Amino acid sequence: MIAPDIFGRLTWNALFPSELVTQVAVVSLGLVVLAVLALVTRMHRWGWLWREWLTTLDPKRIGVMYIIVAILMLVRGGVDVLLMRAQQATSVGTSQGVVSTSTFQQLFSAHGTIMIFFVAMGLMFGLINLIVPLQIGARDVAFPFLNATSFWLFFTGMLIINASLGIGEFSAAGWLAYPPLSELQYSPGVGVDYWIWSLEIAGVGSLLSGINFFVTILRMRCPGMSLMKMPMFSWSVLCSMFMVMFAFPVLTVTLTLLFLDRSIGTHFFTAGGGGNMMMYVNLIWAWGHPEVYILVLPAFGIFSEVVATFSRKPLFGYASMVMALLAITLLSFTVWLHHFFTMGAGADVNAFFGIMTMIIAIPTGVKVFNWLATMYRGRIRFSAPMHFFMGFIGLFTIGGVAGVMLAVPAIDYQLHNSLFLVAHFHTMIVSGVLFGDFAGVIYWMPKIFGFRLHERSLRWSFWCWFVGFVLAFGPLYILGFMGMTRRTSHYAVATGWQPLLIVAGLGVLLIATGVVIMLVQLAWSVWKRAENADSTGDPWDGRTLEWSTSSPAPAYNFAVTPVVQSRDAFWASKQAARRGALAPARVYTDIHLPRNTGVGPVIGALSFILGFAVIWHIYWAAAVALVVLILVVVIRTTGTDDSERTIAAAEVALAEAGGEVSRRVA
Amino acid sequence: MRGRRRLAFRAIVIAVAAAAVVAAAVGYLRTVDVPVLEPKGTVGLQELHLILFAAGLSLLVVVPVYALAITFAVRYREGNARARYEPGLEANTRVEVVWWGIPTLLIVVLSVVTWTSSQALDPYRPLSSSARPLTVQVVALDWKWLFIYPDQHIAAVNQLVVPTGTPVKLLITADAPMNAFWIPQLGSQIYAMPGMQAQLNLDATTPGAYTGLSANLSGIGFSSMSFETRCTSQAGFQSWIATVRASPSRLDESTYAALAVPAVNPRVSYYIDDATGLFDSILAKEQMMAAPASAADPPPLPGAVAARADP
């Protein structure tokens, strides 16, 4: 018999979820994981998976892994939505709906956390990894190993939040876990600890990524690419990473303080004991508001690329666009209080933050007008990415208006925490962030894998998303006016809310159809990749450097480092070639790339043990994991430098001549 | 021309579908209550006016954006060879000044409105009225609302009764996680936080029964935290006070301790409140923990805080 506390709070009972929904979820998740493992084993792909993917330091492959995780989490967060919508559509009067209140509260807490941290952030960092080095004419990121570490911390955060499904429970305190509800007094279980440690670990990964890409963009641009010649996506990422560097430390510290409250009895945010919940709310939004812009600016950058390419015109008002980005970046740190106008701050304070919030609408509006002006006198191809752009304009404008309304404190007093607010921020994040990231994935897919996606089904998927969105969130705007608050698990018949919630549920089913079409289409496109192959490297008649190299892009990105003289450098070189100008002679030299390493996944595994052990109060395991983790990092960063591999000039020449690019790891 | 006809057909289908959806929504909303749009107090009414004003002002941006987006998308589509193509057009200072300028002007207008309305509708600002204000102390509990009428020496759970035409001064706290006090028909919500006293000034202009609720997640019983707000004539209010005073229960320490036990409790109950100062002692309970302890009085241990939750 083992001493009971060797496993801290972890007991056998924690392994058996009581509710049917959770049991089904755990079993189906387990079956999917087993199926994947069996498939890899049967196809004898373990070695390949480890050598080519899990240990890779190639940002393109890391980007692909981010996006795969994000797609899986989109499905997980989407299933949460289906259950939440089913609950709210049926839990009326005498009916208690399809899930218990406790499960419902865990569902919305998990949905928000997963969608922001593991879907939106995953898609964003995925696309940044894929495209930023290519777009600035670099061979790699500034710190390749750090980049892999970031991914594995992100992956670990994802594992921890999903472990809560089968082992114990998840937080029921909402996606931002306001105290004192999230304090030990009111949430004694492991749920909030799962939330804290999932975000603590993933958040450190995001911070490291932020530093990495900020330095990459500032220091590794190809010759000739001054900041004002940089493509707009890279500009937007530069701004976003700047915000990451300043916002994420706040998140890490805030979560740590909450954890100290819960574990060693400090009183930062408790009710009583000198704690103050208002401090937490301020801190979490000092991170949370910039976070919104961290996500949306890169999506704006993607739209800037998409509109210019598919309108066959340069982006209109480049300098204005840069100014708008910078303005949004700075202002994003001055508006956090608008998330809690109803906390009782004085009229002057509320009015100040309301006005600062509205000011952000100005640069955002300018961006919209500049995108429209880019379409003016263009030759617009309405390919799938352009569909998502048009959908974005249609929805984001409405969401923006709702946002400006909520920025007036006296209006917010009436609509705060209502479904109007829920509809507003979903409009911004779905049409702004998700539509942007979808457009980016579709647009850049050929560059990464060398084949295009199935255009027609993507358009069908878009229409499902768009119409589904209107049906799902239109009713929510109205329900806000009807006095329905967010997170409501049960209501009376007389409220008249049910018909609207049923419509919203149907809208979500339509969106789910759109997701299914996307996934089937993805599988089909991979299956038929030979037919959709892009041999040119430039399937959309692109304008920026990433389209100048072959598809799929070789591990070293560019055989010869490009030199640029203007914005839209690749477009300019194509124009010059058309006029008969000769391309400069290509002289190949040896290329040095970082060697793959298994330290990234090891750091991920150790962080998982650390996080999991702390959540369950298995302190000896946490201590061991922490010590080993520190040792691994120290040894890796101070060890002998055999971390590079060289691709000889002759090999590069051979690969380029054959058109068949060697992606073999030396 | 086939492309053109198809485009026109699609536009008609979309317009008809949109019109049908809007008609259905409006038709439905006429049959139900929409509290925020049908305010029954002066605060809610002013807030409705603000909502309508801000929405109207926003149309000045929405309409041009939609018009430009649709026009450009149709006119400059690839299939329309007659449209002009200018692959070098990349900036125009004059038009950019226009679209930096117009949103700026709109925001200046809205900022002025924001500033004045934030002052006028500050929840702490007493409403101007010749009538003497009624004070009600509000405590958010797990998961019910306690309303104490300090001047009438009564208290009620889950029912707030106020006379119309009288300003009501609500002093709000919580002996529970953070909640938000909200009566959509009367206007303005505000957070109810332990150890903090918020203030909300409201009034009712039309008699009736309106639902009040908590707008902030406070645990498992959160959705059941609704209460009835009855707005009556002065005479109706007096007779209600008499009814409450006839209650056999007194709001003493043990009654309060029983009330504070976390439980879903949607029932209405009435109390006589002789031992005035309960509200202050609830507030002080949290604050006392915060105050530096005297030399003879050791600071409370973490365990003591957790113990306070147990009844």
Image (cartoon, rainbow, N blue to C red):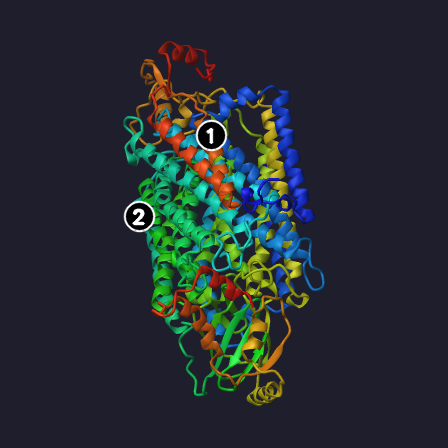
When the figure is inspected, residue A213 is found, relative to residue A557, above or below; the finding is below
- Residue B172 horizontal/vertical position (percent): 47, 73
- Residue B70 appears in the figure: no
Give the residue at x 29% y 35%.
Answer: A227
- Report helix, strand or loop for mark 2: helix
In which quadrant of the rendered image does the C terminus of chain B lie? Answer: bottom right
Give the residue at x 49% y 40%.
Answer: A157
In which quadrant of the rendered image does the N terminus of chain B lie? Answer: top right
What number of labels is visible? 2
- Residue A263 horizontal/vertical position (percent): 46, 51
Q: Which residue is denoted by mark 2 in the rendering?
A: B94
Q: Is the residue at mark 2 from the same chain as the one at mark 1?
A: no
Q: Nearer the viewer, residue A627 or B29?
A: A627
- Residue A249 horizontal/vertical position (percent): 37, 46
- Closer to the eye: label 2 or 1: 1
Q: Which residue is denoted by mark 1 in the rendering?
A: A602
User: Left or right of A330: which side holds B178?
Assistant: right
Q: Using the rendered view, name the quadrant where residue A344 is placed.
A: bottom left
- Residue A85 appears in the figure: yes
Q: Nearer the viewer, residue A600 or A175?
A: A600
Q: CA distance from mark 2 to mark 1?
A: 57 Å
Q: Amino acid at mark 1?
A: Val
Give the residue at x 50% y 25%.
Answer: A53
When the figure is inspected, residue A392 is found, relative to residue A61, above or below; the finding is below
Q: Residues within 10 Å of mark 2 (few under 14, many from 20)?
A: few
**Chain hosting mark 1:** A
- Report helix, strand or loop for mark 1: helix
Q: Nearer the viewer, residue A69 or A321?
A: A69
Q: Using the rendered view, name the quadrant where residue A71 is placed.
A: top right
